[in-house]
Amino acid sequence: MMNESLSAIILISLGILFVPFLSKLLRIPVAVGEILYGIVIGKSTLHLVHPGQWLDFLSSFGFLLLMFVAGLEVKLKEIHALPTRSKIIYLLLPLTIFILSFGAGKSLHFPTIISIAIGVVSVGIVVSVLREKNLLSTKFGKTLFTAGIVGEVTSIFVLTFYSLYSEFHFGIEFWIGLMKLAVYLAVARLVLVFLKSFVWWFPNRFKFFFEKNPSEIGVRISLAVMFMLSVAASIIHIEPIIGAFIAGMIFSTVFEDTESIEEKLSGISFGFLIPIFFIYVGLNFQMPHFSAETLKLLITITVLSMAIKVVSSFILTFEGLKLKETIAPGLLLSAPLTLVVVTAELGKELKLISEETEGILILFAILTGIVAPVLFNLLIKEKEIESSNS
């Protein structure tokens, strides 16, 4: 048993170390590479590593950190400062995506959780691709990033609502669950207002949160907030990851200068714990039996997701983007890797889909995570974007 644990630690450590280099060589997102590595060493292929208690814990911790860091990316103040017209446009985009995905899913008799997987939007790959192409500071990059953020927040709330519905339908417990969620958000907002006022009145006392100090108080407080809100969410039967996401949003709103905290968290998060989560997803991945039906479902949901998001992205022409520049965001938003994985895991946990369907959704996440950035890079050239923003 001890030898198995040691070999598992070595193999996972090697994956954390070398997968980023291999991913760059293969021109695929690192998260996709980590899932593929997990598939190779896991139960679907070589059976070299088997999930254990320590790996379960580290994976869950990485998952919470992933959602917390995603919440930190949401700058509510910046979104609040947008003109009303822009807010409506950015909100219409994910709403249109979900209306089309639910409509398509219903016509094809898909389970609702698959329709949600088709429609979810995540900002992870969007940020990494925009950074790689030096587009984050351009008007195009900011528009796409904001669209991704609003889409991710909307997707999180759709998932939360549906997880409540799937457990209680429209019975009394469903409405109690919604009330609990409303109270949870109200309390979180009160904490936000209190902390924001406290920071405003006593700014000097909070400077050390972001300064270099041996105790790393800022990191401790951010993790404490994450765990407390995750546990609070779990108590009222909301997924803990939702609590972690909301904690990140609260923290980034209260403390506007969170760059140093994000930098400190990024080291241990993206350097160790989050890779373990993605490798763990690969370890548990059960390769679905490939039949004509399986391939048809995989191709259908992939094409639907990309088509729906490209069509919906035409809304961004009202934000001043050209037609070609609206097709590209639709393609990149079609790679919601992390939230598709979240949706698949949630669907299996709630017994809404089989293990085989979960495998198909993870394949869908991997496929779009590879194809969408490649198509985006083919369509968008930095010089063209820079000239269109000058």
Image (cartoon, rainbow, N blue to C red):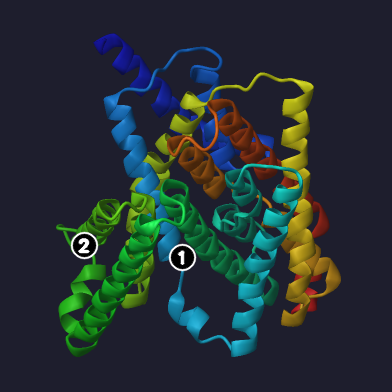
Q: In the visual, does 36 lie left or right of 245?
A: right
Residue ID at (34%, 46%): 268
Give the camera-side residue of 64 and 221: 64
Residue ID at (67%, 55%): 102
> SS of the residue at dot 2?
helix
Q: Position of residue 145 (x, y in %)?
A: 60, 67
Q: Is residue 300 visible?
A: yes
Q: In the visual, does 154 lie left or right of 77?
A: right
Question: Which residue is labeled 1 in the image?
Answer: 73
Amino acid type shown at disc 2: Ile
Tell me the tag on residue 221. 2
Q: In the visual, does 23 lie left or right of 373?
A: left
Amino acid type shown at disc 1: Glu
Q: Where is residue 143 in the image (x, y as percent from the top left)?
A: 65, 73
Q: In which quarter of the image is residue 258?
A: bottom left
* View extreme (front): residue: 171
Does 218 sit above or below residue 164?
below
Quadrant in which the C terminus appears: bottom right
Q: Quadrant of residue 189?
A: bottom left
